Image (cartoon, helix red, strand yellow):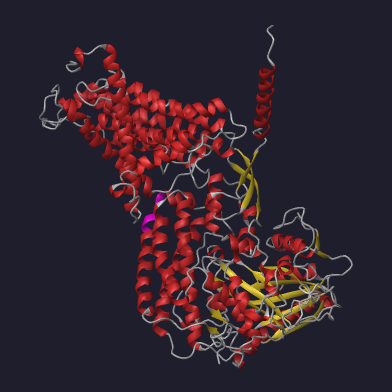
């Protein structure tokens, strides 16, 4: 892949551009998700209007909320482990940022082209568990502790189906590089018909379904929101956080939703590529992010739709669901994919 | 060895102490978790001390009283009509239903009977307050289980019912409309037609919830077999209302002892469920809202003309005697044992509220369940704090 | 399944039928408790009161549940028959609290239906959900000990009701598994529902009393029903 635009710039200039790009890539989808889905879609589904006062149709509501959080006092509960308590939200957000680095948004619009990109993304996504455990432990609150422990159990349980679902795609694409997966989907063809490529949602539908369910659980969104269950654990590991640190958790939650949906878009929906436009065309550096954003929003729509509809599992049911259903299904999926890969 | 500064030493001691504290609280013998008095699941100020082993409840001890207002004492220094405005606040979601048994008890002592129209309107408002009360439960149970949407539907459709109650009585939550010997006012013009329209909405709401929740696999998974109460235990603890009927006991004060209300003239059905679990309690209540809507329409159609007040002296002195009247309130059996000594004020009023008995089963019921099920069970028992604490 | 239409006492047949049922209940109690039943009071078609001795209280609960098949525990409470020493009744033109009059000589104590001898009387109600008939049990609490037998071994629901009676009236229940205060803080002193426990709000604010009853000018006939 040729870095045409970036070729003339010095290394530090490229680095600054990438950092700014990463900030935009993390915050813009997160903000869009919060406004579009959390504020508006949820309200419409619940037969109400949602925020209407701040800006046209309440579009500035998010800024108002951020302003509110920034003004709030940074509270530390009595008996909290202050240092761990302070670092926990940063660890959570950091893992989200690192996840974004391997997601390609265009032929040159990527942050780090790692050969084992998808492997790397899934690995760093687990780092947030540490942050959540830190938060749960350091809060010196029993609800937080239970939330943190539930969260750890849940994230570990659903890491497996997530990885196994991805494995099918990797087998089919023959590469772990995210850019390579996009390329494989774009250049692939289904039964000789190749004009829209071969988005793996069709051939890997089981994998997609498993990935979506596991992703819902990784994001601790209902029906898998046991760790934050506000009606029993009073928001779990986030109970004691306020102000800026709560904002970090909040950003982390929705930015992670964006990151996972970006990965899902790359793996199953064909990523940034558009049929009919050359794979290396420079225009795709501008169009690609938009294509990606659209696909991400489609996936987040599904996530949020489930979130607003279903009641939550109890956590033994949640574990049973992962170990007894999701993991066997995804193992079968891998076996079938491998056999078919060899056969064709 | 380098010298440690005093500040470092203090910090070290403090951190050791903090560790000790944490270790003591988290020893493997178990953990005491304080649910409430301010906790989203207790919708009010009920406190439940649960001893946990992991996430399993070993023992639970509810601590009521954070909202105790001493109504039984206060009634002793108020005239009978004044008591009426007080007892509105017991079950604040279905206030009108609180007034009825007390007024009926006073009427029984005075040997007064309300005219038929007043009895019909009483029954009508009684059922409306049941709808206003139980629809909120139907949404709230969902929100306790993590489904955020149904509660908004519940609030939306409950609002129509509250508007009806408000336009008839002048009070949304505390109507204070019932009088000894009848009612304060007649119904406003156009109210009947409006009520019938609202009942269509209530029925639609029930259908909506049935498809959204009752058929949902996760909802079934979370509620079926959770918090099973066998009928004999339910009777021994004095559970009443839907909690008792969902254990398979076919008893409804409305059908079996219709004191002063016109339920015997209506065509309706008492629903029971054999399972006695949280799902049964939800299901029975859902059916009860439907029955209530059905009854309201019949009551609207059959409303007889006539006066709404019987002849009662202006200063009400209730003759000496004792009376017990109980009605089937939204939360269960609510009764008043009124002792009068021929004064303006009652000598003693024992308020038997449904939630008090319904919650007293909690220590028995919560043994061995998981923390998420604590919330399910509490939500499905459906209590109003004012009804426990009085 | 018999339907008790309690307000229609003039329906002779209905009343007689329920009368029979309730008379049967009294007979059953007398058979089991012998001298334990002191008095009974029957309002045909309405309700039934039975007063038992303090010694027979425990047995009354058992018999009520097992023999009379009244397995539904409705409530348990206490009546303090002492007339209020504060003259709060609105018949009195003088409010003793307001006028800072020392507690006047108590009026003679009068008891309600089925009579009574002591100041405190236990009151409990059991109900049969199949025949739709209930019994109000009463028992005199001995003045010297203020101790009664517990019903918790017969009815689980009696636990909280007895705790309430304990903190509100100071009645002790022998054999109760954990007789602690239910509503009040642990270090609360006094028994609020006793008649001689002053209601503080009445002490600090004058009693509006009869003024409210007379109605505001102009709306005199609002709820008069003339």
Which image quarter: residue C48?
bottom right
Quadrant assignment, res A97: top left
In the picture, the quarter occupied by the C terminus of chain A is: top left
Q: Quadrant of residue B357?
A: bottom right
Residue drawn at x 55%, y 53% as measured from the top left: B377
C94 in relation to A325, above or below: below
Name the residue nearer the viewer: B179 or A101.
B179
Q: From the viewer's perspective, tell me whether residue B138 is left or right of residue A77.
A: left
Of residues A21 and A129, which is closer to you in this image?
A: A21
What residue lies at 54% left-to-right and 48% top-to-bottom? B373
Residue A108, magenta (yes or no): no
Residue depicted at x 48% and y 86%: B117
- Seen as rendered, the residue at the extreme top is B1
Residue A176 visible in image: no
- Please state if C98 lies on the left or on the right of A312 as rendered: right
Q: Residue furthest right?
A: C144
Q: Give the main secondary structure, helix, strand or loop, of the magenta stretch.
A: helix
Q: Which residues are magenta?
A: B210-217
Question: Residue B190 placed where, x, y %?
Answer: 36, 80
Q: Is residue B361 above or below residue A206?
A: below
Q: Position of residue C5 (x, y in %)?
A: 57, 84
Q: Count of labels shown?
A: 0
Q: Residue at x 19, y 16 (%)?
A: A3
Residue C57 vertical placement versus A102 (above, below): below
Residue B290 shows in this picture? yes
Quadrant, the N terminus of chain A: top left
- Residue C113 x, y percent position in the rendering: 76, 82
- Give the image location of residue C221, x and y in percent: 55, 88
């Amino acid at each position: 892949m040729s870095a045409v635009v970036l070729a003339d710039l010095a290394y530090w200039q490229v680095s600054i551009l990438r950092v700014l790009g990463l900030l935009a890539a993390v915050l813009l989808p997160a903000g869009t998700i919060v406004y579009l889905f959390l504020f508006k879609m949820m309200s419409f589904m619940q037969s109400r209007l949602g925020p209407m006062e701040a800006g046209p149709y309440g579009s500035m509501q998010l800024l108002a909320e951020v302003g509110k959080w920034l003004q709030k006092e940074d509270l530390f509960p009595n008996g909290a482990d202050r240092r761990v308590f302070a670092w926990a939200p940063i660890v959570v957000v950091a893992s989200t940022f690192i996840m974004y680095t391997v997601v390609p948004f265009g032929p040159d619009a990527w942050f780090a082209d790692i050969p084992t990109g998808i492997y790397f993304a899934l690995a760093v996504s687990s780092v947030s568990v540490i942050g959540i455990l830190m938060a749960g432990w350091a809060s010196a609150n029993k609800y937080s502790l239970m939330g943190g422990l539930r969260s750890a159990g849940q994230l570990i349980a659903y890491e497996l189906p997530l990885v196994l679902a991805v494995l099918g795609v990797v087998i089919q694409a023959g590469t772990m590089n995210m850019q390579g997966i996009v390329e494989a989907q774009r250049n692939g063809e289904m039964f000789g018909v190749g004009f829209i490529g071969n988005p793996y949602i069709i051939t890997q539908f089981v994998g997609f379904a498993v990935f979506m369910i596991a992703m819902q659980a990784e994001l601790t969104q209902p029906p898998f929101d046991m760790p934050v269950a506000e009606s029993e654990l009073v928001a779990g590991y986030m109970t004691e956080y306020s102000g800026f640190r709560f904002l970090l958790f909040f950003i982390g939650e929705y930015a992670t939703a964006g990151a996972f949906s970006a990965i899902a878009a790359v793996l199953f929906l064909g990523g940034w590529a558009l049929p009919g436009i050359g794979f290396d065309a420079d225009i795709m550096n501008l169009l690609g992010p938009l294509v990606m954003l659209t696909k991400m929003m489609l996936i987040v729509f599904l996530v949020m739709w489930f979130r607003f509809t279903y009641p939550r599992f109890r956590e033994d049911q949640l574990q049973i669901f992962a170990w007894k259903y999701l993991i066997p299904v995804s193992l079968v999926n891998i076996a079938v994919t491998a056999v078919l890969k060899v056969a064709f | 060895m380098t010298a440690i500064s005093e500040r470092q030493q203090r910090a070290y001691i403090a951190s050791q102490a903090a560790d000790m504290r944490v270790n003591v609280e988290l020893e493997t013998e178990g953990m005491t978790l304080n649910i409430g008095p301010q906790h989203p699941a207790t919708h009010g100020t009920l406190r439940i001390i649960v001893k946990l082993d992991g996430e399993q409840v070993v023992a639970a001890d509810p601590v009521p009283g954070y909202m105790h207002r001493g109504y039984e004492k206060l009634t002793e220094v108020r005239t009978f009509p004044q008591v009426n405005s007080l007892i509105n606040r017991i079950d604040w979601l279905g206030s009108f239903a609180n007034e009825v048994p007390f007024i009926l008890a006073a009427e029984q002592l005075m040997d007064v009977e309300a005219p038929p129209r007043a009895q019909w309107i009483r029954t009508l408002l009684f059922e409306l307050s049941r709808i206003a009360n139980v629809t909120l439960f139907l949404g709230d149970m969902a929100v306790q289980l993590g489904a955020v949407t149904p509660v908004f539907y519940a609030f939306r459709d409950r609002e129509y019912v509250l508007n009806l109650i408000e336009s008839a009585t002048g009070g949304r939550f505390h109507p204070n409309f019932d009088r000894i010997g009848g009612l304060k006012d007649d119904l406003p013009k156009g109210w009947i037609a409006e009520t019938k329209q609202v009942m269509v909405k209530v029925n639609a709401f029930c259908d909506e919830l049935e498809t959204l929740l009752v058929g949902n696999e996760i909802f079934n998974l979370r509620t079926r077999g959770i918090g099973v109460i066998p009928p004999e235990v339910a009777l021994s603890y004095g559970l009443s209302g839907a909690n008792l009927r969902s254990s398979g006991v076919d008893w409804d004060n409305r059908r079996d002892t219709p004191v002063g209300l016109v339920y015997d003239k209506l065509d309706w059905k008492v629903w029971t469920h054999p399972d006695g679990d949280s799902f049964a309690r939800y299901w029975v209540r859902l059916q009860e809202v439907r029955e209530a809507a059905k009854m309201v329409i019949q009551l609207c159609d059959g409303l007889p003309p006539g006066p709404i007040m019987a002849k009662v002296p202006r200063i009400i002195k209730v003759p000496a005697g004792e009376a017990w009247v109980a009605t089937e309130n939204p939360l269960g059996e609510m009764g008043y044992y009124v002792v009068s000594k021929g004064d303006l004020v009652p000598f003693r009023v024992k308020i038997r509220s449904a939630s008090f008995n319904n919650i007293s089963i909690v220590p028995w019921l919560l043994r061995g369940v998981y923390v998420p099920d604590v919330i399910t069970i509490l939500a499905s028992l459906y209590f109003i704090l004012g009804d426990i604490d009085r | 399944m018999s339907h008790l239409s309690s307000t229609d006492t003039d329906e002779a047949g209905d009343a007689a039928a329920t009368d029979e049922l309730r008379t049967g209940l009294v007979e059953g109690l007398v058979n089991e408790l012998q001298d334990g039943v002191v008095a009974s009071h029957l309002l045909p078609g309405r309700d039934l009161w039975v007063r038992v001795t303090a010694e027979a209280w425990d047995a009354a609960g058992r018999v009520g549940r097992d023999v009379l098949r009244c397995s539904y525990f409705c409530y348990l409470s206490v009546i303090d028959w002492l007339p209020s020493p504060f003259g709060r009744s609105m018949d009195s033109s003088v409010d003793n609290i307001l006028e800072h009059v020392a507690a006047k000589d108590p009026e003679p104590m009068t008891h309600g239906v089925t009579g009574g001898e002591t100041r405190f009387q236990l009151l409990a109600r059991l109900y049969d959900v199949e025949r739709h008939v209930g019994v109000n049990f009463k028992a005199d609490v001995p003045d010297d000990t203020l101790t009664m037998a517990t019903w918790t071994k017969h009815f689980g629901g009696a636990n909280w009701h007895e705790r309430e009676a304990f903190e509100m009236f100071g009645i002790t229940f022998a054999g109760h598994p954990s007789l602690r205060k239910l509503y009040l803080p642990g270090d609360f002193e006094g028994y609020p529902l006793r008649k001689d426990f002053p209601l503080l709000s009445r002490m600090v604010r004058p009693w509006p009393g009869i003024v409210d009853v007379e109605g505001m000018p102009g709306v005199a006939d609002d709820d008069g029903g003339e």
